[in-house]
Image: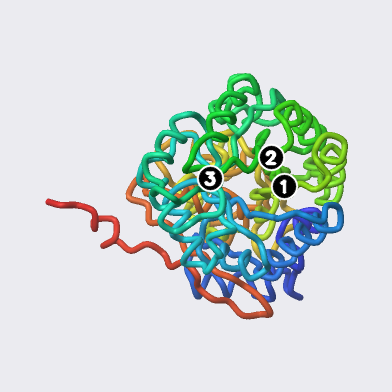
């Protein structure tokens, strides 16, 4: 079990001589003592190496290409800054992600704005800061853009197309199927493309497609490309993201190279050879680069054994939202003679506040430090204040040094928005 569990933690993680987990050269117990629990720990070097892998693998397969990190997966300014420093663009799905991307130092021309229900304020931010591409999701986007773009100026846009591909993933994270709330069917996209092509304020640059998230098979990605060809030739094709990550023993996601072989192979068959290809990895970029440390607060033994920790759905909503499976281990004894099948639960007042349902832990006890791997995607961004919960800190670990990049929320901040 020890080797298997360790393989789920950020690349480069190890065990000290006494069995304590080490991430980014930092002992988990020392991180918990310094920053408290729960704490989200990011192995910075693993994050950088994954960004380099994606950029290098895509460039090796398609000369005119660009990797754009899907910020929604982990919209911390510090994470975005790593991506910028590694030469990647950023995908923003809302106003806050635009502002944090700019704070991270991104070239605005390398930002792609998404959203199926963009507000006037968000579109105004995109125009004000001269973002490179706005992905048009419907005709209302065009109305807003034309109302906000100044006379004589032009905003470059892509049109999001529903490819009619149903990926094998949870229904809540499918996005390319017929009936998706995102984008337009090809028959609806064609007249909107024609309208944009005549607009004096917009420049039609190309198409965007996305089939979903946590996809562990390359076939849906490849099948999403052909429907784009029927709409004509364009200079830019954004083929989205969605590659899955390894959360548990049974997950076997394709490598970045295998994913890109399938995607670029389809592009070579269906798209213009001189077009620019953009990809938007999110989950697969950051998920396994981080883990979360918790403190066990209570253990209830009886018909079932519940191990409760000082976090839960306030810092990890993925289980409650779409049943994502995680694993866990007691720091200092990932393995042992007294393994006990338990359910790890959170501190929130919901029966659905379960972190791991059915996991073997070695003699769990109050005060133990519990480590949950693969929490780098969609945990930080969906953190919430349920039950007066304070959002947790983010720590970067590397070369044996740790630095705080997002501090723990304070009690005063929970009340700061009150006006009376």
- Name the residue beneath numbered marker 3: 134
190 relative position to 124: left or right: right
- Label 3: how many residues lie within 10 Å, few (<14), some (14-19) or many (20+)? many
Q: Are marks 2 and 1 in contact (CB under 8 Å)?
A: yes
Badge 2 or badge 3: first in the primary sequence: 3
Q: Secondary structure at mark 2?
A: loop
Q: Residue at x 59, y 64 (%)?
A: 41
Measure the C-alpha gap from mark 2 to mark 1: 6 Å
Measure the C-alpha gap from mark 2 to mark 3: 24 Å
417 relative position to 11: left or right: left
Q: Is residue 373 visible?
A: no
Front in this rendered view, residue 146 or 181: 146
Q: Are marks 2 and 3 in contact (CB under 8 Å)?
A: no
Residue 113: x, y in percent?
52, 47
Mark 2 vs mark 3, foreground winner is 3
**11 versus 180 height, above or below:** below
Measure the C-alpha gap from mark 3 to mark 1: 27 Å
**375 versus 29 height, above or below:** above
Q: Which disc is residue 214 wearing?
A: 2
Badge 3 or badge 1: first in the primary sequence: 3
- Label 2: how many residues lie within 10 Å, few (<14), some (14-19) or many (20+)? many
Mark 3 vs mark 1, foreground winner is 3
Q: Is residue 195 visible?
A: yes
Residue 23: x, y in percent?
68, 69
Q: Residue at x 69, y 23 (%)?
A: 164
Q: Are marks 3 and 1 in contact (CB under 8 Å)?
A: no
395 relative position to 211: left or right: left
Front in this rendered view, residue 48 or 130: 130
Q: Which disc is residue 245 wearing?
A: 1
Q: Secondary structure at mark 1?
A: loop
Front in this rendered view, residue 14 or 65: 65
Q: Residue at x 46, y 35 (%)?
A: 142
């Amino acid at each position: 079990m020890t080797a298997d569990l360790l393989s789920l933690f950020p690349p480069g993680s190890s065990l000290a001589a006494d069995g304590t987990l080490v991430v980014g050269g930092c002992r988990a117990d020392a991180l918990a003592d310094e920053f408290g629990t729960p704490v989200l720990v990011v192995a910075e070097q693993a994050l950088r190496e994954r960004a380099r892998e994606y950029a290098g693998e895509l460039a090796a397969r398609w000369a005119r290409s660009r990797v754009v990190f899907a910020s929604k997966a982990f919209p911390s300014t510090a994470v975005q800054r790593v991506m910028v420093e590694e030469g990647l663009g950023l995908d923003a799905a809302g106003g806050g992600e635009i502002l944090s991307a700019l704070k991270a130092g991104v070239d605005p021309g390398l930002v792609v704005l998404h959203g199926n229900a963009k507000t006037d304020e968000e579109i105004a931010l995109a125009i004000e800061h001269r973002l490179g591409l706005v992905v048009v999701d419907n005709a209302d986007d065009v109305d807003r853009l034309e109302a906000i773009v100044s006379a004589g100026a032009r905003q470059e846009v892509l049109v999001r197309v529903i490819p009619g591909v149903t990926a094998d993933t949870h229904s809540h994270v499918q996005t390319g199927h017929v009936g998706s709330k995102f984008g337009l069917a090809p028959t609806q996209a064609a007249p909107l493309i024609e309208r944009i092509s005549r607009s004096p304020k917009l420049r039609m640059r190309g198409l965007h497609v996305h089939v979903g998230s946590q996809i562990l098979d390359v076939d849906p990605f490849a099948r999403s490309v052909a429907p784009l060809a029927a709409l004509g030739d364009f200079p830019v094709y954004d083929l989205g993201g969605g590659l899955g990550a390894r959360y548990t023993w049974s997950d076997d996601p394709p490598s970045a190279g295998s994913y890109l072989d399938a995607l670029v192979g389809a592009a070579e068959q269906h798209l213009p050879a001189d077009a620019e290809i953009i990809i938007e990895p999110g989950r697969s970029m950051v998920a396994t680069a981080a883990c979360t440390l918790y403190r066990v607060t209570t253990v209830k033994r009886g018909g079932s054994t519940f191990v409760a920790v000082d976090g839960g759905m306030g810092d990890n909503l993925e289980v409650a939202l779409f049943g994502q499976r995680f694993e866990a281990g007691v720091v200092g004894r990932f393995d042992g003679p007294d393994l006990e099948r338990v359910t790890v639960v959170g501190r929130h007042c919901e029966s659905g506040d379960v972190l791991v349902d059915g996991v073997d832990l070695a003699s769990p006890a109050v005060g133990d430090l519990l480590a949950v791997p693969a929490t780098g995607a969609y945990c930080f961004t969906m953190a919430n204040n349920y039950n007066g919960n304070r959002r947790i800190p983010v720590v970067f670990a590397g070369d044996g040094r740790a630095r705080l990049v997002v501090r723990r929320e304070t009690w005063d901040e929970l009340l700061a928005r009150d006006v009376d």
